[in-house]
Amino acid sequence: MESPLTAEPYRIKMVEPLHLTTLAERRRCISEAGYNPFLLESRSVYIDLLTDSGTGSMSDSQWAAMMEGDESYAGSRSFQRLRQAVADVMGFSFVIPAHQGRAAENILFLTLLKEGDLVPSNYHFDTTRAHVWNRRAVPVDLVSAEAHDPELEMPFKGDVDLARLDDLLREKGPGKVPLVMVTLTCNGTGGHPVSMANLKGLRDITLKYGVPLVMDACRFAENAYFIKTREPGYQDKPVAGIVREMMDQVDGCTMSAKKDALANIGGFLALRDPEIVQRAQAWAVLYEGFPTYGGMAGRDMEAVARGLREVLDFSYLADRVGQVQYLHSQLVKAGVPVVKPSGGHAVYVDAGAFLPHLPRAAFPAWALSVELYLEAGVRGVEIGSVMAGRDPRTGENMEPRLEMVRLAIPRRTYTYRHMDVVARAFLDLLARRERVKGYRFEYEPPVLRHFTARLSPM
Ligand code: F0G
């Protein structure tokens, strides 16, 4: 194994100035935003950990490639380079470009799902879940039970419970389950990876029942890094080889290029079966665009093609995941309750444990995300009761298992010093946590309420 890195494996050649706000300014901004961090202007945010999606820095090589973008409507060279990169890195022969990950999900589900179908996964990401519902099919989460215990230290908490999947397929059969999905890494429960052993188990079961297995591959390289550093037998295998072995287990993938393709926009659906590709292409033309650009500019396809190759670099991944683990360890040291172990792209703070005096109805994770902004201008995202919304049948607030604030770290964007500022903000918040107040709705939108809701402190 390489010796430990001492600093970032890149240097900075372009900077974007950040605006430092005063507490008085932040009070005004968050009040004007209806106490909803989503409604803040980015200029009033100092360190933005809302998402790692499309917010990273591209390399000089990606920027250079963008100048070679071929903007032809049909048959562009940029598409050929994207197709070649997907074939080389992932081993899929067919690629349907899409404007981002959820668009690839839409095309896949339009092609394969009908009303009443079941779609098992370890844990569906919100957009995947919504697109399954949109086809009047039912998403089923089968992540291992351990994933829901924040204190449990296990190397692969994103693994699918294979026994439950086998039971489901035996009971319902391929007629009701047209595909199985697996999300790498498992964003919804903590950014935890899926092991190669679990992927191989999934392959065996889906082959047994003749059901295609499709990967939500957004963070495939971070997952490969965890396999290399945590799973016996993979230590000496290059990341590129691990990625190919991961992809060899599945029939295709949906991809958001805004994550592990290191781009600011883009995505694709990649498949092996030419018959499914043909049907999917018909939908893609309707919703995305001609099959050789599908919602992306030629220059975007160039950036994605380069990014897919760059992300396999071990020193990049060690630095990227290492920075997330650094923030995680600083928070643990400070006594902040966090989901363990650290995820690949984000740290998940257990807000229920951080603010035990606040009942769920007072939205503790929302309160913590507002306080974090007030404390230091840091924006995280609530993954708790506000985001969970109401049960459409009863109108009652749904209760997710955990009230969390996710701190998602953009790739190659912030330094370790920024992480220290975030850790320090939590330390200061710990000292005054009993005084943090809960929140109530002033305006509650009927769907996806967290994006545009307005709230006020109780
Ligand atoms: N799948 C996973 C696991 C994701 O994390 C995301 C996006 C998507 C699919 C959809 O991709 O945004 O390109 O349409 N996650 C972002 C996040 C939004 O903040 O975690 P998209």
Image (cartoon, rainbow, N blue to C red):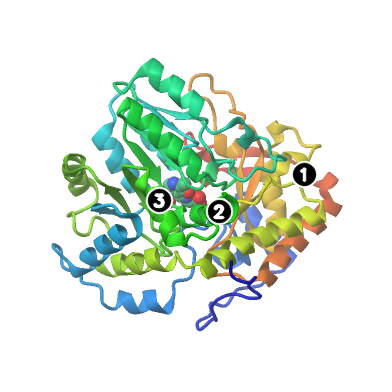
Measure how far apart labels 3 and 2 are at the Cα level.
14 Å
Residue at the limit of the structure toward the bottom, as seen here: 13
Residue at the limit of the structure toward the top, as seen here: 171
The answer to which of marks 1 and 2 sits earlier in the sequence is 2
Mark 1, residue position: 354
Q: Amino acid at mark 2?
A: Phe
Residue 218: where, in percent of width, then height? 43, 52
Measure how far apart labels 3 and 1 are at the Cα level.
40 Å
Mark 2, residue position: 226
Q: Which mark is residue 245?
A: 3
The answer to which of marks 3 and 1 sits earlier in the sequence is 3
Q: Quadrant of residue 83?
A: bottom left
- Mark 2 C-beta to ligand 1 under 8 Å: no
Measure how far apart labels 1 and 2 are at the Cα level.
28 Å
Residue 22, compared with residue 11, is above or below; it is above
Q: Are marks 1 and 2 in contact (CB under 8 Å)?
A: no
Q: Secondary structure at mark 2?
A: helix
Q: Residues within 10 Å of mark 1 (few under 14, many from 20)?
A: many
Tag nearer the camera, 1 or 2: 2
Tag nearer the camera, 3 or 2: 3
Q: Quadrant of the N terminus?
A: bottom right
Residue 21, compared with residue 49, is above or below; it is below
Front residue (pair 136, 271):
271
Residue 397, compared with residue 55, is above or below; it is above
Q: Amino acid at mark 3?
A: Glu
At 51% from the left and 66% from the top, the residue drawn is: 314
The answer to which of marks 3 and 2 sits earlier in the sequence is 2
